[in-house]
Image: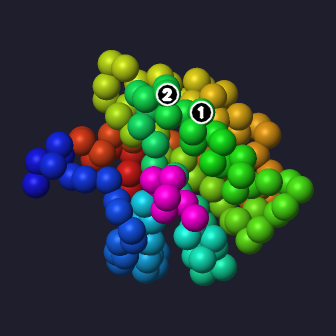
Amino acid sequence: MKLERIPPTVGLNLSKVDKRNGEFIFWDVGGQNVLRKIWDKYFSECNGVIFVIDGCDSIRFEEVSETVERLYNRDNPNDLVTLPLLFLVNKKDSAEFRGLDHVRQQLKLNQVYCRKAIHVQAISAFKGEGIE
C-alpha cells in the first residue's frame, strides 16, 4: 500500500507481534480528539504507552503536550503514571524534522508526572528506521 493512502486510525486496531523476547499486543487507539474520550477504558490493561507523533508538524506539538499533560496529571493521577512512556517521533528522514531536543522541549517532558521511564526515539516509518 502506498504511504499516502494509509489513513489515520479511527477507532481501535489490534496487532500481535512475536519477537524472540516475547509476544507483544498493540492497541492502536486513534488520536483524534473525539476518540481520546475512550482512552481511559484501556489504561488498566496496558503495560506501556507509545505516542507516535509527526516530528515535522510543530503545530501539533502543542496539542500533544496538552494531551499528555491531561493524561499525566499530578493532581489526578491514573494507572498511566506507573507505566513506561515512549514517544516515537516520525519523519527523522525529512529535512523538516525538528529534532529530539526541540520535541522534548515543546512537549514539556521534564514536567510530565510519570513514575517510570520516558523515552523519545526518532524513527522513519517510511524507511523502517528506529522502529525495531
Which residue carries the number 2 mark? 59
Q: Which mark is residue 38?
A: none
Q: In this view of the protein, which residue sits in the foreground, 22 or 52?
A: 52
Packing grade of label 2 (10 A; few <14, some 14-19, many >=20) is few
Q: Which mark is residue 62?
A: 1
As helix, strand or loop, the secondary structure at mark 2 comes to: helix
Q: Amino acid at mark 2?
A: Ile
Q: Residue 89 appears at what percent x and percent y?
A: 46, 40
Classify mark 1: helix, strand or loop.
helix
Coordinates of residue 20 in the picture (x, y in percent): 39, 75
Residue 91, relative to residue 28: is it above or below?
above
Side of 90 where 121 appears, left or right? right
On the image, the x and y values in percent for residue 32 come to: 45, 53
Q: Position of residue 111 (x, y in %)?
A: 79, 40
State the extent of the magenta-drawn residues as a range: 31-37
| Label 1 Cα crowd, 10 Å radius (few <14 / some 14-19 / many 20+) | some
The residue furthest left is 1
Residue under the image location 42 percent in, 37 percent down: 54
Tell me if label 1 and label 2 are in contact, CB under 8 Å: yes
Q: Residue furthest right?
A: 75
Residue 17 visible from this viewpoint: no
